[in-house]
Image (cartoon, coloured by chain):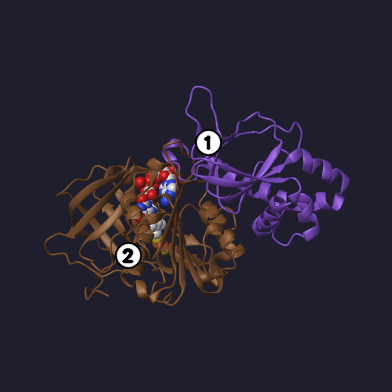
Amino acid sequence: MVKIKGLDRMLREHPFFEGMGADVQGIVAGCASNARYEADQIIHHEGDKADRFYLVRSGVVSIEMHVPGRKPVIMDTVHDGEVFGWSWITPPYRNSYDARAVQLTRLVVLDAKCLRKKMKKDCAMGYELLRRFIPVMAHRLTSSRLQMLDVYGSPKRGG
Amino acid sequence: MSPLPALNDPMLPRPFRIERAWRELSDTFSLYLVPQKGAKGFAYRPGQFNMLYQFGVGEVPISISGDAAEPLKLVHTIRAVGTVTDAMAGLKRGDVIGLRGPFGTPWPVEKMAGQDVVIITGGIGLAPLRPAIYHLLANREKYGKIIILYGARTPNDILYRRELEKWRGRFDISVEVSVDRAGHDWAGNVGVVPNLISRAVFDPLHTTALICGPEIMMHYSVKALNTAGIRDKRIFVSMERNMKCATGFCGHCQYGPHFVCKDGPVFRFDKIRKIFSVREI
Ligand SMILES: Cc1cc2nc3c(=O)[nH]c(=O)nc-3n(C[C@H](O)[C@H](O)[C@H](O)COP(=O)(O)OP(=O)(O)OC[C@H]3O[C@@H](n4cnc5c(N)ncnc54)[C@H](O)[C@@H]3O)c2cc1C
Ligand code: FES
């Protein structure tokens, strides 16, 4: 009980849940738990089941791609107050990248199966969550496109 | 401001000698210029540029990247991207080039007194902003928060890295660097520089933002600043267009109703918002 109360407060304070009704927040809190990752610890691998998504309370998480025969490439870093892991929303529910703690990182982990079940039952709650997730996804998409443009590349390299 | 006068005939290149030339990055170098005998030094303001003339090759606009409080230490930082800048990359101590200037509008460093200042820049765009940063730091007490957000392609492409590290070590300014991609040997931010804006803390109603970098990066930075509550009137951008005369005569640098050489390169964003998003202008 105490644990849920603490998580409830953490969710309330996290920017992702800003302005969310207490009733919906309470339901979400029922699917939440706390996690702590040491520097360099892998949070999930590409291809793993996407059965969780994450709110960063403090720390830094790197989003990485692996190209066979090459060193991993960090594509993005996620910081305090941000979220990551959106593969839980759409089938086949598999992570599309690795996530690694760059430093000691504290997360709120949301159990995706639990959330999906509740969202099916409670459309208003489902809408509330998607309404918050879609702008995050749109923002990431725009950022990735900008990165792909390689705006600082040399004109000689064709960038 | 320095008592040195501006140069007289704006169309006449004056001979300047390379006192020192050094490499900043694999494709970027800096030149420290001193007037050749008979030529005079001159005062300039942060954000202004000179036309540098490589004899027998051509002339290019290059921002002054040194400290305007020490105008005799005239520094330019140049990225080798084509005919003239490639030739300049071969310059060494003792060589002589032609110089006209200074030209263009400066960053509004005096008008920003009393405000928080957010500087957003990427790649070689840090060079035209460095004189403004020197001014802010030399007059630190006149400003609120000073936040520098810099983006580079990879950790190996961070311009003025030692200086950024030194500024980051100060207690009275905040410096964030982000790269577009990195390996595990980089423990800093990865992602595009506009993303740093939402993480920065400033008072949007009393903040002035200065932006210099590729146009697409400036476009998204303005969007992020607007979202953060900063209005166009408090946003200044530095534009680039090809130039010939640099004095507002030839029309080469026309940008809508403006000439970048005379009305810019530094524009208040509300003055150019309409044309900024027009393609092929
Ligand atoms: C006001 C102003 C200030 C500037 N300040 C600086 C500075 O401080 N340092 C610096 O390195 N450069 C600066 N520039 C840009 C610089 O003037 C150009 O890079 C230079 O004119 C290129 O000439 P070039 O003969 O070497 O290349 P060109 O042979 O003319 O061009 C070679 C290739 O580079 C591309 N190119 C040309 N100019 C640019 C550009 N500006 N950006 C990206 N690609 C380009 C061309 O499309 C072509 O593909 C500034 C430009 C302006 C207008
Ligand atoms: S370069 Fe001639 S008008 Fe600007």
Q: Residue at x 57, y 47 (%)?
A: A106
Residue A85 locus on image (x, y percent): 66, 41
Q: How many marks?
A: 2
- Mark 2 belongs to chain: B
Residue B14 locus on image (x, y percent): 21, 61
Residue placed most toward the observer, B33 or A96: A96
Judging by colour alone, the chain drawn in purple in this rendered image is: A
Classify the position of the C terminus of chain B by image quarter: bottom right
Residue B160 locus on image (x, y percent): 33, 51
Residue identifier under label 2: B134
Q: Amino acid at mark 1?
A: Gln
Q: Is residue B9 left or right of residue B151?
A: left
Residue placed most toward the observer, A126 or B180: A126
Residue B244 in sight in this render: no
Residue identifier under label 1: A41
Q: Where on the picture, by quarter, is residue B223?
A: bottom right
Q: Secondary structure at mark 1?
A: loop
Chain B, colour shown = brown
